[in-house]
Amino acid sequence: MTTNNASPGLGNGGETHQRAAGSGDVLTTNHGAPVSDNQNSLRSGGRGPTLIEDFVLREKIFHFDHERIPERIVHARGSGAHGIFEATADISDLSRAAVFTKGEKTEVFVRFSTVAGGAGSVDTPRDVRGFAVKFYTREGNWDLVGNNIPVFFIQDAIKFPDLVHAVKMEADRGYPQAGSAHDTFWDWASLMPETTHMLMWAMSDRTLPRSLRMMEGFGVHTFKLVNAEGEARFVKFHWKPRLGVQSTIWDEALKLQAADNDYHRRDLFEAIEAGAFPQWDLGIQVFDREFADAQPYDVLDATKLIPEEDVPVRLIGTLTLNRNVDNFFAETEQVAFLPSNVVPGIDFSNDPLLQGRLFSYLDTQKSRLGTTNFHQIPINAPRCPFGNFQRDGMMQTKVPKGRANYEPNSLAEHGEEGGPRESPARGFATTNLSSGPDETGGKLRIRAEAFSDHYSQARLFYRSQTKSEQAHIASSFVFELSKVGHLEQVPPRMLANLRNVDEDLAQRVADGLGIELPAKARAAKEPVDMAPSDALSIHKNMKQVLEGRVIGVLIADGTEADELKSLVAAIIKAKAKAVLVAPKIGGVTLSDGSRQKADGQLAGSPSQIFDAVALVLSAGGCSALVNQSAVVQWVVDAFAHLKAVGATAAALPLAEKAGLREEDDIVGLGSDFIEAAAKRFYDREPALRTLA
Ligand code: HDE
């Protein structure tokens, strides 16, 4: 058959021939010539000029000079892993997609990302996180390219370049990196009331994930599911993390940036390496046109969500990340996600943001990966046979045989290969599920009236949060707006919008900034009160389990050996990880005279990288440390970041020096500690810091 089918090596993530490139006993040039000396270039005499004929040197430098490719315009910093998706429910009544056949296992590649920062930026800025999944299904690749927030800043793709220009580093000065707390972002956002709902999420703890393993994911747009009879229904996709959603707090996130640039990337890699495979359940919210018509918002508007209380999320499959990448560039950097990659049984809606994305992602890969043949790169190639009459182009790696490079052809009638043919029965077909009025009509640059309510769901989100979460939102607005230079124009404009969300919130932010509350902005449509949705709160849904968390255990010379042993055993039993921190990496001498190596040295292991801390010190160990400010700070930070602090009786002087009270703030190291370490003590916060 005359196709450009995937070569055999691609069947398994391209492992065979790609790995071979770096193996072998003899160092060669890229063209296979053995290299005799990789230390010295060819020169005339020991101190003479280097010769241009040195093809070994020239090829090596030439290749090195071109190692970098353009980074992604957005979502440049990301971390990826391989895994498996297993369909766990029969939804053949809803979708004909093979990936959803109950029991079907499909290989996947997932890339998580921050949005605003460059590829070399840090992992923990306040930012939305990308959650992109490529399913290598037997009917072609399906890419669900989502975020960890279910709504977006804008309603129409035509505004995306403005959003991205405004949030990225400012055009003249080249800073700030990876953050929205600056003039141009808030100037633009305050002029765009449709951003308000997303801003509520962005200012909440959702943008400070504790771990990539502890984030929800959302397809954001309304899509369609189509069954074998061609019947279509609307759908929203959700990823629910098995470890629950957990976030850090702002002070902790700031300190994490200094403590570990790669905090999330390292956490994901180490968890997978240790066999603690992160898992998510895939959920769907399915609804029909009748439901859509009855809502006070438009289901085609990506600034809106559908409350889970209105349409429950039905779990239909499980994603398990079980293999780290072999090579960051080949896989995580070169993976190309395309929202236009759907398979029969999954279809697009008319969401104008989604429609714009269908063009953008294909287009951008050409400039990022350099060729229209980027689909042949192993990480992007389908794992099922694929073939058509598209030919040639830069970096064509396939060798299609025969004369058939056009269709229709009758070559088969003459005994030649005719090539593949279209398949109306198996192929993707766009389905006709009407999503309501205004779907057809004159050619106009307008937005439907149904998109004009910019505040009701922002209010819904704010009012669904706990008091502590509301305080975090108000404080984030204060922090971000306080970084704006144009204080007279921009914050008042933002506050005028916030008054439409919640008067109390607007007042708190104004008070926090120390400025007058301006008049309310005129709303394109008056907001309505929607019933609060508990599903939108992190705190109300926190899973208080130790699984997947990391406990910092401070030890010093004289630490009671048995006490340490039983604590570490209890932590491991609870499926968490214990990291032993000592003044010196070489370790300590325990009470029984044995040497215990440390996992981390104190200065390099600040307490923000842990979910809870335990001070396992003897009286001698404690008095050796109690006057060192770095040690005291270790405890101060853990407590201020609302984490459990456990201590041996002998370690109490250190905890007290850090300002903790024995009765209320410190737990013993038995089962109490294991229970407390799974929690965050949000009720502690008002006494510790001023929140807006
Ligand atoms: Fe993206 N987005 N986006 N985006 N996006 C890109 O594609 C774009 C949007 C998302 O790990 C780019 O390959 C437009 C929403 C993720 O490789 C680019 C619009 C959502 C990733 C692009 C949006 C996303 C991207 C940059 C408005 C959540 C990282 C490089 C219409 C549903 C994928 C690339 C990865 C990446 C365009 C809005 C998620 C430029 C035009 C909404 C997770 O093509």
Image (cartoon, helix red, strand yellow):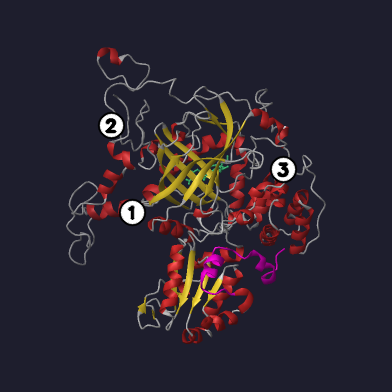
Q: Position of residue 436 (x, y in %)?
A: 67, 27
420 in relation to 503, above or below: above
User: Which amino acid lies under the numbered mark 3 shown in the image of this protein?
Assistant: His
Judging depth in this view, the residue of 181 and 203 nearest the camera is 203
Give the image quarter of residue 25: bottom left
Question: Furthest-top residue in view?
Answer: 413
Residue 228 colored magenta? no
CB within 8 Å, label 3 to label 1: no
Point 59% across, 32% down: residue: 234
Which mark is on residue 64?
Answer: 1
Quadrant in which the N terminus is drawn: top left
Label 1 secondary element: helix
Magenta residues?
666-692
Judging depth in this view, the residue of 196 and 35 nearest the camera is 196
Q: Position of residue 359 (x, y in %)?
A: 52, 35
Q: Earlier in the sequence, mark 1 or mark 2?
A: 1
CB within 8 Å, label 1 to label 2: no
Inter-mark Cα distance, 2 to 3:
53 Å
Q: Earlier in the sequence, mark 2 or mark 3?
A: 2
Q: Which residue is mark 3?
A: 454
